[in-house]
Image (cartoon, coloured by chain):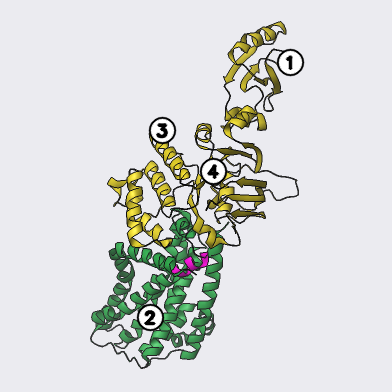
Chain colours: A green, B yellow
Amino acid sequence: MNWKTFLALLWRDARVARRNFVPLLLQTFLQPMMFVFIFGRVMVSSGYMPAAYKSLLLPGIMAISMIFTGVWAVAMPLIAEFQFTHEIEDRLLAPIENDWIAIEKVLFGAAQAVVAGLAVIPAAWLLLRPGVDLHLQSPLLFVGVTLLVAFFSACGGLALGCSISQTQIGLMFSMVLTPMIFFGCTYYPWSALANFPILQKVVLINPLVYASEGLRGTLVPQFPHLPIVAVLVALLVFDALFLMVGLRQFRHKAVT
Amino acid sequence: MLAGIRTRDLRKVYTSPPPMAAGGGFVPRRKNKNQPAREIVALDGLSLDVTGGEIFGLLGPNGAGKSTTVGILTTRVRPTSGQTWIGDYDVWAQQVEVKRLIGVVAQRPNLDFSLTAREILLFHGAYFGIDSRTRTARATELLDRFKLSDRADQLVRGFSGGMMQRLSIARAMMHDPQVLFLDEPSAGLDPQTRLLLWEIIREYNQSGKTILLTTHNMEEADALCQRLAIIDHGRNIALGTPAELKASVPGGFLLRLRFGTHSSSLLEQLKTLAGVREVRRHTDSENGADVYADRGGPLVSEIANLAATTSVELSDVHISEPSLENLFLHHTGRSLRE
């Protein structure tokens, strides 16, 4: 492991992110904010949704923003760099083990996911107030859940970015990310699926369930949520699994 | 320290379509019918010894295995079997040490599209741990040397092919590597830029650096390389200095003949003409023959006379002077440009 090279790789990604700041911002916030506005503001003020929904919605929106940002920040550049511009070749020839190049991507993606997740809270709060009822009981636990969620989204981005081809990007969104979001207990708590017992079990393979439920459990514990220990264990398992799969796929792409 | 390159019995068999790191473009070969059809032998026992400090050329047609060789030597392609060393380092086992020693210009542009030309050089320098002051100075010097200063602070997205190629070479030299790999370096460059590149390559070599370049351009191989290996179907078929290699072609001159009909007796008689060293029937067409001789034009009338006396029509004659092209043809029966 060569720190100088690793830091230079991080610095390069930061430079590119700074250059693309505005599109990045719109991409991260536009969709969740519209959702927050329609469901949290329009539907609630017109009486179609109870006022408490505002608080229930916020952790879910935060989870979506984080997953979307983490996956996007890692997967999209990798798809382009491996298959279109081939620009990753320069980094693969830098004096550092190839695995660290993948890990750098994951760290940078995770950092972007954390920023996106934390920025959504004040933005949504501004859009929804009054009536958002956050109870941050254990900041440490909240930080832990946030970091685990950010890390698995970035690792998922690594696995996806090294597995799918340019022509399958549309499919990645419609077949992977959209079902994950809708069946990820983002707009409703997991307990709301009680009337659909089979579905309630099946959605447990969706890592986003643990992200939303974990954030719900730490931000708005007054609502029903999965036990936090189960959430932490599940997130750790998904982190390790996605990192392993992602690194394996990266090695396949990096060396033929 | 001069770092050489060694390979021993390198073999590479692709079981899937040719990969990006090898540049693609292979001619599929099936050794026996039980093998799956997609198995492609790119390298078939290649051994090379490049001495530290020399400009060494790999010459061969598309699909000969040149890019795969470069891929293996630069840690991007895993050999199926065999070993490679750069300097004292085993390429596969000591990748980081090897990456420190080498600079690589890939066949296809692979510049960082999100950065400007100057940033590409600066970040490349940073990856190699060069301090800020040195890398800034070196980037400016290289941009100037490669005539890119006026576009230095623009994103490379809008660069022409030739500019991208120049920047790729500048980037490969940025960390002053001991061994420089250039895969088809002058493809797509105009003649003037090609001469500039040759000059830069020679100059870089004079500072004690080893250079391995691949090309299918005779002129380039002849002008630049101190030694050459001619590669075909993943095997080394000839090795030596350009002069030695050219001298190894019988006679030097090559006359490619085409007749109206095939006549074995005519081919036998051709061999008796003064100065003719070797006569070979074309493998691809029945009615053609290659005559290797120590003279060119003066032979044509004698050949025409001989054809007339055997009632065979001489339909086409092509004369080549001594060249690496003739050499390749002599060894493989195929033209490099085919």
Residue in view at x 29 percent, y 76 percent: A38
> SS for tag 2?
helix
What residue is rendered at 45% in x and 42% in y?
Answer: B201
Q: Share a chain, discs 3 and 2?
A: no
The residues bearing labels 4 and 1 have C-alpha atoms spaced at a distance of: 48 Å
Q: Inspect the image, locate mark 3, and give the three-letter code of the amino acid beneath it.
A: Pro
Cα distance in 3D space between marks 4 and 2: 63 Å
Q: Which amino acid type corresponds to the residue marked 4 in the rendered image?
A: Glu
Disc 2 residue crowd, few under 14, some 14–19, many 20+, Cα 10 Å: many
Q: Which residues are magenta?
A: A93-104
Mark 4 vs mark 1: give the one in front.
4
Q: Amino acid at mark 2?
A: Gly
Q: CA distance from mark 3 to mark 4?
A: 24 Å
Q: Residue at x 53, y 51 (%)?
A: B2
Q: Which residue is mark 2?
A: A60
- Which image quarter holds the C terminus of chain B? top right
- Foreground residue, A126 or A146? A146
Compared across the picture, whether A86 is left or right of B8 comes to left
- Amino acid under disc 1: Ser
Callout in the foreground (3, 2): 3
Whichever of callouts 3 and 1 sits on the residue coming sooner in the sequence is 3
Using the image, tell me which numbered label, if any, was put on residue B54.
4
Residue holding disc 3: B191
**Residue B263, numbered label:** 1
Of residues B24 and A225, which is closer to you in this image?
B24
